[in-house]
Image (cartoon, grey):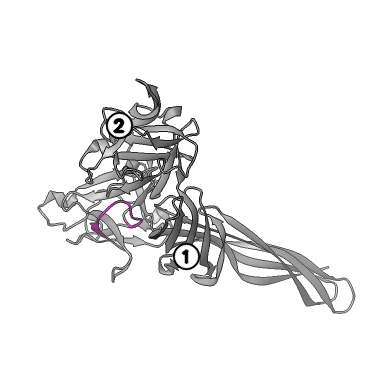
Amino acid sequence: MASPLVTGGCLALRSKLNGKYVRYMPEHEEGKVLQVSGKDAISPYTRFQVEPSKKHEGHIHLRCCYNSKYWVARQLPGAWLIHAKLTANVYMLSDSDKTKQTLRGCLLLGDKDSSNKDAYMFSVINLDKQMVLPKYICFKADNDMYGRIIDDDNRYIQFSSDDIGDPRVRHTIHTNEDGTIRIKSALNDRFWRRDPNWIKADSDDTTSNNPNTLFRAVKFGDMFALQNLGNNRYCTRLTLDKKKSCLNADVSTITKESQFRLEEAVLSRRIYDVEYHLMDAKIYDKKVLTMATAQAVNRASTDNTVKVTLNYSVTKERSWESSVSLKLGVTATVSAGVPEIFGVSMELQAEITGSYTWGKSDTRTQEHSVEYEINVPKKTKHNLRVLATQAMCDVPFSYFQEDVLTTGEKVVQKFDDGIYRGVNSYDFTYEVTEEKL
């Protein structure tokens, strides 16, 4: 798998010195700092997006997945350092102008006088196309059947059930600190294990030490592939040795039979207690729009008052999504306020509640009609325009998610990886120019 440092994508950085991950610290007293203190790579605070520089070949930009803001280097005499302290703090800039944030030379984290080279060494954890999977899922193969445990001593996974409510098809995902996963059958409380290449739900090992019980989920479009870390081969639906449509990890490429659709074992979902982090909001792509135009013409030889009507529409777009965790098509009831841009700041509008598909953009248009009376001098034409500023915003937020599973069980989880994306217009003004007839 190509490094995201070359191709772009998502990554985490793990220190060789202390085994911790570079982490954004929103709670830090100095604000907008990074520390080598993260415990895992499954948090929006420890995941970073790589963007190859368009201006400087071989250079990259790093952007935090939590708030979409870029890293910035601090220039010291003779070198570029990232806040060279023993605590390994680095600073991010809120400015979205990438030309100001290309990192030249080496990225150094730690005390510049330190003799311990491990203080400067980081492992790159490739997380490209690897989102954190939902906790309770079912696997559906290319034969449109769910994977279930066969009722025998071997506990093979066979794709032979058409019922998502079948207790044998439900599995729980256990995500490791580096983004790899272990998969446990909800029926017998055993983890999946490769033996020798067949996948069985028979392991009671609760550690992540056995690579045969570890998997990497790769997402492409709406489909997923599962790579077993014991042999680095992909799992596929296979009929062989008197086993029909069972899961086997022995293909080197992602074939048709190696592509799976994941579905959540969830009947209903509610998103509530949404807390927006407005101080970390990003406002960008500002532009002035002409919303409406009209003319007030006075051809008479005396001044007149002319009435004109200005008709225009105002469109708002909004979406709630997550930067790390996946929501697999479950429609949720969302109760949340709506952030809107007002100049250089954000304001929270009244709370709404409604059915919503996570990650889907919601566009709403409102029509406006304004009557405008203007005094027009004789033999004169006035050109009227309604102007407004439109901008986009990304606002990180935390939230609670309540799921009702196919078993009827109610499960509540807290997430910190929400991203609200919105587009709205503000600063409406009227402009009048005069022309002599």
**Residue 272's disc number:** 1
Q: Which residue is mark 2?
A: 154
Report the amino acid beneath label 2: Asn
Q: Residue at x 72, y 71 (%)?
A: 432
Residue 192: x, y in percent?
30, 38
Q: Is residue 424 left or right of residue 183?
A: right
**Residue 383's disc number:** none
Q: Residue at x 33, y 55 (%)?
A: 43
Q: Residue at x 77, y 66 (%)?
A: 294
Q: Please state which of residues 263 and 408 is positioned toward the viewer in this rendering.
A: 408
**Of callouts 1 and 2, which one flags the residue occurring earlier in the amino acid sequence?**
2
Q: Please state which of residues 98 and 220 is positioned toward the viewer in this rendering.
A: 220
Q: Residue at x 48, y 61 (%)?
A: 271
Q: Which residues are magenta?
A: 35-45
Q: Is residue 54 visible?
A: no
Which residue is farthest top? 241
Vertical order, 149 against 366 (above or below)? above
Q: Would you identify the image quadrant in which residue 296 lies?
A: bottom right
Residue 44 on the magenta segment: yes
**Helix, strand or loop status at disc 2:** loop
Q: Is residue 383 visible?
A: yes
Observer-side mark, 1 or 2, equals 2
Q: Quadrant of the N terminus?
A: top left
Q: Is residue 17 left or right of residue 350?
A: left
**Helix, strand or loop status at disc 1:** strand
Question: Tag 1: Cα neighbours inside 10 Å, few (<14), some, or many (≥20)?
Answer: some
Question: Mainly helix, strand or loop, the magenta region?
Answer: loop
Residue 337 on the magenta segment: no
Residue 416: x, y in percent?
38, 60
Query: Gap between marks 1 and 2, in whole Å?
Result: 43 Å
Q: Is residue 175 left or right of residue 341?
A: left
Report the amino acid beneath label 1: Tyr
